[in-house]
Amino acid sequence: MVNYNKHSCLERAQNLLLNGDDSMLRYACLEVRFCIEAITYEKLNAYSDHVPAKVFKKWQPNHALKMLLQFEPDADEDFSLCICPESELGKPTGNWTNMGEYRTFKLNWLNKNYNRLGSYLHMTQNSSSLIEDVGETDKIRKDLQEITCELERIINSDIIAATLSVRIQFKCQACNQLSVANETVLHKTNHAICINPRCGAEYHAAKEDNGSWKFKMIATSFKCLNCNTTSWLESRCLNIGTKFRCRSCGEVHQIIDGQWQYERESKFKKIGAQKN
Ligand SMILES: [Zn+2]
Ligand SMILES: [Zn+2]
């Protein structure tokens, strides 16, 4: 039985790196990629309660990494987690217990190296020689050493799938699936994307006075030319040639023209200056 947990994958990669000859390096790349995938899924577990299992299970590694980047674009701070009982709300008693250390890395680092390792799993296209030169072999070995070293530091962290931010659930209007966003990210960007890999609808998110979040799909309304019902089309799909269906009667329409208004930038600036 082969174990594909992050520790086993990293251990096999390190063994290949240490004991294998150069022809084993690309196999080591594969094991390191498995390790990164295991870490990604483990991190995503912090969100699994907020996402329907059937959506979660369909995520391929690339999409999973993309989602993690959306959830935690800045999650790159190491921290120690301490807890303490409170005598009353907001007043810790001072008896702190250290729960352990959380180590992480920039998700961009993870994403970049996942793709770099992936590029080593293919033969060079149109290569005139089938023999790899020493420079290329050395580069793969050096990259592997750097990446495995950093991964080893991370996977020996005490706390794994920790997220200190609040997760906000919303239902996607386009695909009807439940989706999730990270509140810290929403405060910064006011933007969310449906997590369904087949959908990806974009939303503008705003916090209401009562503290709840309102998600509005970025879409354009249109009137069906057959049944006159007003419906919507996602703005990211607006393009000449795009075909879309009326959600009421099913009539197919095609965008044949777009009307954008424009003016000279200097004029725009002048008006702005007058206003001020
Ligand atoms: Zn959706
Ligand atoms: Zn219609």
Image: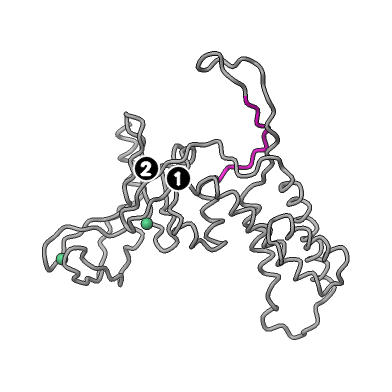
Label 1 within 8 A of ligand 1 by Cβ = no
Identified by mark 1, the residue type is Ala
* Magenta stretch in the rendered image: 73-83
Q: What residue is shown at x 53% (from left), y 56% (from top)?
A: 66
Instruction: State the quadrant of the N terminus.
Output: bottom right
Where residue 58 appears, as percent x and y from the top left, is: 48, 63
User: Camera-side residue: 119 or 63?
Assistant: 63
Identified by mark 2, the residue type is Ala
Q: Is residue 71 magenta?
A: no
Q: Secondary structure at mark 1?
A: strand
Q: Is residue 247 left or right of residue 118?
A: left
Q: What residue is shown at x 34% (from left), y 52% (from top)?
A: 172
Where residue 102 appears, as percent x and y from the top left, is: 68, 39
For disc 1, the marked residue is 181
Q: Is residue 77 magenta?
A: yes
For disc 2, the marked residue is 205
Q: What residue is shown at x 69% (from left), y 28% (from top)?
A: 98
Q: Above or below — where is 174 with respect to 123?
A: above
User: Camera-side residue: 54 or 126?
Assistant: 54
Residue contact between numbered discs 2 and 1, judged by CB atoms under 8 Å: yes
